Image: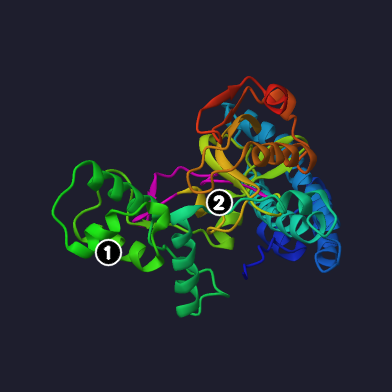
Amino acid sequence: MAANTPEIWTYDQFKTETNPKDVRKALAAIDQYLKDWGVIKNGPSTEGKILHLRKISNACIDYVTSKQAKADKKAGSRFSKPSSRLVNRIAKAKQLAKQVFLRMTFEKYEYQKSVRSGPGTKMDALAGEATSVKGGYRNERTNFVNTKAAGNLGGTQTAINPQGGSFVHQRMEEHNADPVAAPPNILAMLAKSFDALTLQEFNDLQAHFSAGGQGLGALPNVHYARKDERLREMMLVPLDGLLYTSDGNICNAGWNGYAMDLYGNLLVAKANKSWNHGVSGAQFNHSTLTAGLDVVCAGEIKIAKGLVEYISNESGHYKPSAKQLANCIFALVEEYSLPMLDSVKDVVDVSSGNKLEFKGVLPFLA
């Protein structure tokens, strides 16, 4: 699927944004790295691009850290205030840092896809043990694919919100717990299990229940994130043993849904912004995160100050096994260099039908 390559300012653009006629000694490192980026960004090495983006980011952070202290000191003084030039340069360095992090997210995705997931790699082996959407939830993915094909949307980032499996499943359970009158053909479908529904039956029930109200909680449609949205709002970037969002902030996702795609990319629902359960009239599920594609694992996660504190395989859409949860933890250690043994306080496995709780990674793996 095509996605827009995030661009960062060139040296000339950054210079224009930050008072080009003034002395730029303090900005020299950023200037030089941006000049070098003009060549490196067209090179073949994705890993080299990531390393150079780190240099630009660190230079921006160093500049902001040193100059912000100076600006704050002057702002608190009775006799002087920070110059508008300094305030502008700090703001522009922060803006450049955000551009760099978003581009780093993109390059990290490409690196995992093209280098770390090739034949014979560890991620390739883990992807071979992946899990797909289960039972009646497969109809979500089929409707997404059909809508994309019918609208010729394969090369675009146009939003697609297919009929929601959670909605149909919940309304079936509500009806069967408290039956009400319905046409004979609908009653025949309701007599089947959710996982046994054909695509046509799934869509017919969705239309029937949508016309009669939304029920309790689940929305009629589910949001399927396209690649641009995944990179900008859901994918986490590992740096120095911590998880960052694509806007350059240390991740504090709290309790949230996650999925690890086949390349080892960790996706967390709206990781870098506040959000509610519905968006544009559609629901967020685990299938949202990878547009219904197979995953290494999916479940619930808690991230605080860039560290994973809780992880599980609690996903009704994917129903990952204990082995698949272990594979995800392994990838977070091997691919992300995260200190999972030290940071994770709780691991929960629900694959047996019971909720098994473990105080840390080692007891779970044992």
Q: Which residues are magenta?
A: 265-284
Disc 2 designates what residue? Answer: 233
Residue 27 shows up from this direction: no
Query: Which element carries disc 2, helix, strand or loop?
Result: helix
| Residue lying at 41% horizontally and 63% vertically, measured from the top left | 162
The verdict on residue 270 being magenta is yes
Question: In the image, what residue type sits under mark 2?
Answer: Glu
| Residue lying at 62% horizontally and 31% vertically, measured from the top left | 72
Residue 138 shows up from this direction: yes
Question: In the image, what residue type sits under mark 1?
Answer: Ala
Where's residue 142, x and y in %?
48, 66
Counting every numbered tag in the picture gives 2
The verdict on residue 269 being magenta is yes
| Residue lying at 55% horizontally and 73% vertically, measured from the top left | 156
Where's residue 41, x and y in %?
80, 64
Q: Quadrant of residue 326?
A: top right
Q: Is residue 139 above or below residue 85?
A: below
Please identify the residue farthest to the top as the structure is shown. 359
Disc 1 designates what residue? Answer: 207
Query: Which element carries disc 1, helix, strand or loop?
Result: helix
Q: Is residue 346 above or below residue 6?
A: above
Local crowd size for mark 2, using a 10 Å CA cut-off: few (<14), some (14–19), many (≥20)? many
Q: Earlier in the sequence, mark 2 or mark 1?
A: 1
Please state if 1 lies on the left or on the right of 276 as rendered.
right
Where's residue 244, x and y in %?
66, 41
